[in-house]
Image (tube, rainbow, N blue to C red):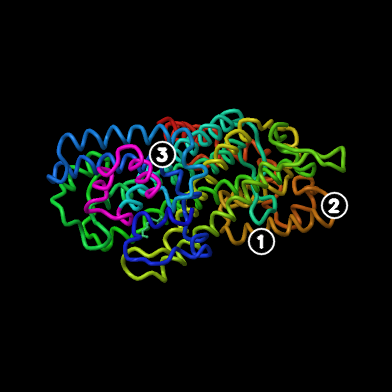
Amino acid sequence: MADASHVMWGGRFREPMDPRLDRLNRSLPVDRRLWAEDLATNRAWVHALEGAGVLTAEERGTLLTGLEVVERVLADGAADDAGDEDIHSLVERLLGELIGALAGKLHTGRSRNDQVATDLRLWTLGALGRLDVTLAALGRALVAKAREGLDVLMPSYTHTQRAQPVRFAHWSLAHAWPLVRDRARVADAGRRTSVLPLGSGAIAGTGFAIDRAALAARLGFAAASPNSMDAVGDRDFAVEAVFVATLAAVHLSRLAEDLVLFSTAEFGFVVLGEPFTTGSSLMPQKRNPDSLELVRGKAAQLLGRLAGMLAALKAMPVGYQKDLQDNNAALFDALDGACAAADLMAGVVAGLTLQPGRMAAALDAASLATDLADLLVQAGRPFREAHGVVGALVRRGEELGVPIDRVPAGEAGAIDPGLPAVLARLGGAEAAVERRRTAGGTARAAVLAQLEAAAAAFSG
Ligand code: ARG
């Protein structure tokens, strides 16, 4: 339907559009999902035109009734196989077929440039809301797992090497706090998205007496844009939404990465719920963490989308250019992907079975080396000296093939006369976690305090 594209601007053209241009230019398959936003924008514009004296009350009524029918037709899938250039031209055509020439008044004083920018902002506000809901649900799942694992001890890791004992709850909440920050970023991005471009025309503003403040209020925007040239080409809000989604996806990816490791036979700290794993077509024994791998993969795709959007924008002169059109697909894809990934991770986390025995078995005495040095410090030794003494004990243990707490007292005393006494007071992993009582530490009371704070952060 190459000629449908000419409906809106065919007057000055003699020849139809080349099908090769049409193929890249036609955005309906992507932007048809903006139909609800486009109808909202159209309705608000009808009221604005009446306010500006362009439409009579009767015309306003006819247009609004017509848009209602168009809404039903679109809800029934009219956009699915239409040949129109984009959602805006489709709505205008459908309205024209319903109510005739009056439909031609609707585009008075506006452009698809301010229209698509408005639709996209409305869509983005909705998508940010959906992202917030899914991130909060994942946060609650992590908090619930933390509660379950409050008294379960495990090694923490730096450089993927065993470091110090922590509570499983501490680990779980370490993945929850980034989501608290993500949700704050979602809210912040939403504030900057809530600015109305409509009434900017193609670039220079509208030639009709539109009350833009009333228009903004009707569409639920906090304010109207202050500069029409900026408003039609500004996609900062979309980039920000994709960045926020990408950073959230990166956080999900780190959680996924931890769980891939922890669910291996080698670690065995957790067992993934069967519904979140797949089998192998060849190896009957396999149960694979595809859910986690898909989440990691999604994060990679999102950050590619973000880079693509920024690259398109950096080359753009002020105002609207068609480069922007492909950014719409990136925006939709990124927000969809982040929501789907967060949704999936909430299920994965809820479905985890903890294996406290395997975690405890991984807590070797070496993970208490820092505690031993700290005890020497309490006995009056400078930390650097204590570090060296314990290092020598670790080396001696390795030579003897025993853990540091099994090095014979005589051997330990030969390394440093202070060692046997502090070794006797070292205790196990439980003692080590309870020594870390400061806020943010891994002692039970400290973890419980952050657990309640995280629960409150995800309750709303
Ligand atoms: N389909 C276009 C987009 O999504 C709408 C704006 C078209 N404006 C124009 N001047 N051709 O970006």
- Mark 3 packing: few (<14 Cα in 10 Å), some, or many (20+)? some
* Nearest to viewer (mark 2 / mark 3): 3
Sequence-first disc among 1 and 2 = 1
Q: Which residue is mark 1?
A: 388
Residue 256 position, x and y percent, is: 63, 45
**In terms of depth relative to the viewer, which is nearer, 47 or 398?**
47
- Amino acid bearing label 3: Gly
* 354 falls in the magenta region: no
- Amino acid bearing label 1: Gly
Q: Do residues under tags 1 and 2 come within 8 Å of each other at their CB atoms?
A: no
Residue 362 position, x and y percent, is: 74, 42
Q: Residue at x 25, y 43 (%)?
A: 102
| Distance between mark 2 and mark 3 Cα atoms | 57 Å
- Amino acid bearing label 2: Gly
Location of the C terminus by quadrant is top left
Q: What residue span does the magenta drawing correspond to?
A: 88-114
* Nearest to viewer (mark 1 / mark 2): 2
Residue 359 visible in this rendered orientation of the protein: no
Q: Residue 56: which quarter of the image? A: top left
Q: Identify the mark at residue 401; answer none if there is no mark.
A: 2
